[in-house]
Amino acid sequence: MSLSQFKTRITTVSLFFSTVFTFFSCGNEVPIAADWQEKIVVYGLLDPEDSVQYFRIEKAYLDPKTSALITAKESDSLILNPADVVLRLVKDTNVKFNLQRVNRMPKDSGLFGNDQNYLWKTTAPIVANEEYEIQVTSTKTGQRVWARTRTLSSANISAPVKSNANIFSLGTEYITFEWLPRANSYAYDIKLEVVYDEFPSKDTFNKKEHTLRWDVLTNYVVSPNKLATARVPRLAFMQFLNSAMKADSSINRRIKYVNFLFYGGNQTLADYISVNRPSIGIVQKTAEYTNINGGYGIFASRSFQPIRQVRVSYGTIKVLQTNPETTGLRFVY
């Protein structure tokens, strides 16, 4: 699981830095509480760069008379309802937002019931480098849980491009990624997307658009206000293209543009991902990590900064046409 994947999990599985990876199959993997003792489970990431903040808030319990596999299929067994969910700015008790419960995003099928997928959201602006507190109260049982986290400030990105107006080039042996992490940044994921058209060499109007995503850096540890630099061999990029595309003498490809995706996470999020990383040893049981007081889950912060639709240089296409790794992929300008 990575910073970028955490948010995807929150967004696709139930909703909502990797993951939150699919807002979550892993979100359902929580310790089972005592018989019929309701436990509140909270997953939420504050992103000052985003216009909407989503939270996954559910419950966990054990039915002593029914198999957990059967109980999991019942959405009512997972939904915390009714509940009060409040987000507040710690330094100013007058700044608080009551989150709205919504059921608009489809949930993937699987072990857990997917006929309902309730999330909690707020469109309130989130301020960078501030401490926030989430409070969740079950109005049925009176149980209350809470957690605090400090939000990230956005990074200053200087390479390989600074803005959408820049041009991406493979003119040197290395692709240099350079950015200045700001307050509360601890780790970064960087991804490069290649958006291209594929078409028969004898029928240039029969185009199909494709997107490839290359995981350039994963959980790359940084220090706030200290320039971060990573040099990645351009050969690695060409080897990625070689593995992701199939050479075909009847097919041409034209790169429309590339996207650079920067995902930053604070230390709370990075620690959660690190602890929940799949074990590669004989013992598969992992430690339990939560920063939810009185419950389970994670309340942390991340920052997603995309640089989209960056054009590639003519020289870059020439490199792809002549390098042994990519010459068979038939790129045209």
Image (cartoon, rainbow, N blue to C red):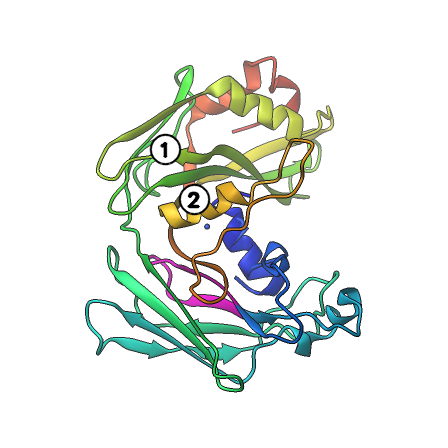
**Residue 290 shows up from this direction:** yes
Relative depth, front residue between 155 and 62: 62
Q: Magenta residues: mostly which secondary structure?
A: strand
Query: Is 242 part of what is drawn in magenta?
Result: no
Above or below, 28 against 320 in this view is: below
User: Quick one: SS at disc 2?
Assistant: helix
Label 1, residues with CA under 10 Å away: few <14, some 14-19, many ≥20: some
- Which image quadrant for residue 100? bottom left
Quadrant holding the N terminus: top right
The span picked out in magenta is 41-57
Residue sitting at 61 percent across and 76 percent down?
79
Mark closer to the chain start, 2 or 1? 1
Amino acid type for the residue under numbered disc 2: Ala
The correct choice, above or below, for 198 with respect to 269 in the image is above
Q: Residue 78, position in %: x, y?
A: 64, 72
**Residue placed most toward the observer, 18 or 49:** 18
Find disc 1 in the rendering and name its residue. Answer: 167
In front: 85, or 119? 85
Q: Which residue is mark 2?
A: 270
Outermost residue, left direction? 92
Instruction: Tell whether position 47 is magenta.
Output: yes
Q: Is residue 22 visible?
A: no
Residue 49 lies, in percent from the top left, at 34, 57
Report, in whole angstroms, how far the alpha carbon at label 2 lies from the one at label 1. Answer: 32 Å
Give me the residue at 37% from left, 34% from top.
221
Q: Nearer the viewer, residue 253 or 221?
A: 221
